[in-house]
Image: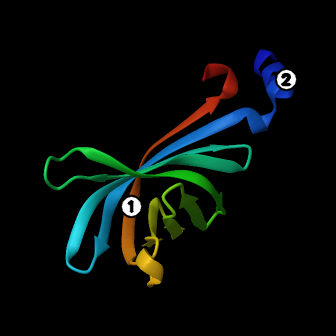
Amino acid sequence: MKFGYINKLFGSSSRENRTVWLGTIRYADESLDMRLKLIERAGSFMGDLQVVDSLNSQLVQIGIIEGGTRTPTSITFVTNTELQFTGNLQSGSLVGTLVFPPPNGEQGLVAEVNLIEEHVEYLPSILR
């Protein structure tokens, strides 16, 4: 009965889902390891996008997610660095494209992204 009261008090919109996706980003012959962290709450999400620097193996943030949508089969978002991601969810994997902002009015580079869901946490807002 106690948890029923908490759910009534805070509602399902107070629940936060945190998901970490790991995989690669590929453009032409280049490939980098990639990490995507999504934090979903009340139908919207935020998070960040990182790649592993090939010179020193450190994670480097390439964008903070500013807005996006998630359906049962897809995820799309844009970042503060104007990266645009569109991907399809398929049995624990996320496959899509990342479009880099166009330099000097030219067409932006399109990279292939392949990620696997690594970790999920479901936290009620009272525990955050």
4 left or right, relative to 30: right
Circle 1: residue type: Leu
Which labelled disc corresponds to residue 57? none
Total number of numbered discs in the rendering: 2
**Which of the pair 11/68 is nearer the observer?**
68
Circle 2: residue type: Leu
Q: In this view, does 62 lie above or below 123?
A: below
Q: In this view, does 123 lie above or below 108?
A: above
SS at circle 1: strand
SS at circle 2: helix
Q: In this view, does 92 lie above or below 85?
A: above
Q: In this view, does 25 lie above or below 107?
A: above
Residue 47: x percent and y percent? 52, 46
Quadrant containing the N terminus in the rendered view: top right
Q: Name the residue under label 2.
A: 9
**Which of the pair 15/33 is nearer the observer?**
33
21 left or right, relative to 15: left
| Picture quadrant where residue 32 is located | bottom left
Residue 21: x percent and y percent? 42, 52
Whether residue 98 is visible to the viewer of this picture, yes or no, is yes
Alpha carbons under labels 2 and 1: distance apart: 36 Å
**Which of the pair 122/57 is nearer the observer?**
57
Residue reaching furthest to the front: 104
Quadrant containing the C terminus in the rendered view: top right
Whether residue 108 is visible to the viewer of this picture, yes or no, is no
